[in-house]
Image: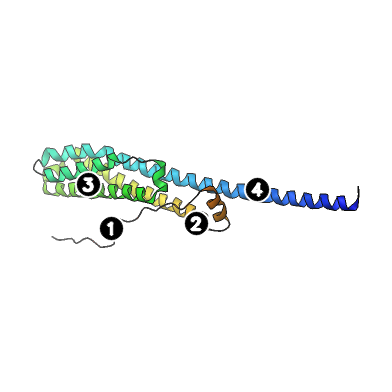
Amino acid sequence: MSRGAIIALSILGVFILLCLAIAGWGFGVYNKLVSYDENVKQSWGQVENQYQRRFDLIPNLVETVKGYAKHEADVFEKVAEARSSVGKLTVTPQVLEDPQAFKRFQQAQDALSSALSRLLAVSENYPNLKANQNFLSLQAQLEGTENRIAVERRRFNEAVQGFNTLVRTMPAAIIASMTGFHERPYFEAVEGANVAPKVQF
């Protein structure tokens, strides 16, 4: 074998090794993107779980309050409307990829939270209701669920932060744009949450 052939084979070998190294790096980055993406989806599933738990608790809470506060029809109607609008939302994995759909989902959940706050405020006017064991149990479950929702939303935002950071940093950004990965939306605070509520006695 001539010296020129040996050099050509050496160059070809180096080129093949370089291509394999680049491909291996690309597959590694892609697998990391998939792993972070799955973490976001898993976190989203936990958020949905807690929202579903709250959704299921509401009818029992409303019926318990209705027994004591029959003339608070407006409050019950608002809770029913907010729950209905949440129930109409079709939550698919695509919600995570569509910022507008994600925003609609968050707005519906925030409206339901607001309606529930008004329902619980009504209970303050009814001492017998506040002493009712069913109401106290439901209220405790709902408060626990709201806390779980807050925790899961925080975890979701942390997962989104990790994913978005990976998608936006080089060189992973190149693989992300080539394979269709893009930033995900965060849960945001309810409008007006930065203003402390006024407490009057």
> Callout 4: 10 Å neighbours few (<14), some, many (20+)?
few
User: Could you say whether the residue bearing mark 2 is in a helix, strand or loop?
Assistant: helix
Cβ atoms under marks 1 and 4 closer than 8 Å: no
Residue 117 x/y as whole percent: 21, 49
Mark 3 or mark 4: name the one nearer the start of the chain.
4
Q: Is residue 196 above or below residue 152?
A: below
Residue positioned 31% across, 44% down in the render: 145
Residue 134 x/y as whole percent: 20, 37
Q: CA distance from mark 3 to mark 1?
A: 17 Å
Task: Look at discs 3 and 4 and give the one toward the viewer.
Answer: 4
Q: Which residue is mark 3?
A: 116
User: Could you say whether the residue bearing mark 3 is in a helix, strand or loop?
Assistant: helix
Q: CA distance from mark 3 to mark 4?
A: 52 Å
Q: Which amino acid, mark 2?
A: Thr
Mark 1 or mark 2: name the one nearer the start of the chain.
2
Q: Which residue is mark 1?
A: 191
Q: Which amino acid, mark 4?
A: Gly
User: Could you say whether the residue bearing mark 1 is in a helix, strand or loop?
Assistant: loop
Q: Which residue is mark 4?
A: 24
Mark 3 or mark 1: name the one nearer the start of the chain.
3
Q: Which mark is residue 165?
A: 2
Mark 4 or mark 2: name the one nearer the start of the chain.
4
Q: CA distance from mark 2 to mark 3?
A: 35 Å
Q: CA distance from mark 4 to mark 2?
A: 22 Å
Residue 94 x/y as whole percent: 41, 43
Q: Which amino acid, mark 3?
A: Leu
**Tag count in the figure?**
4
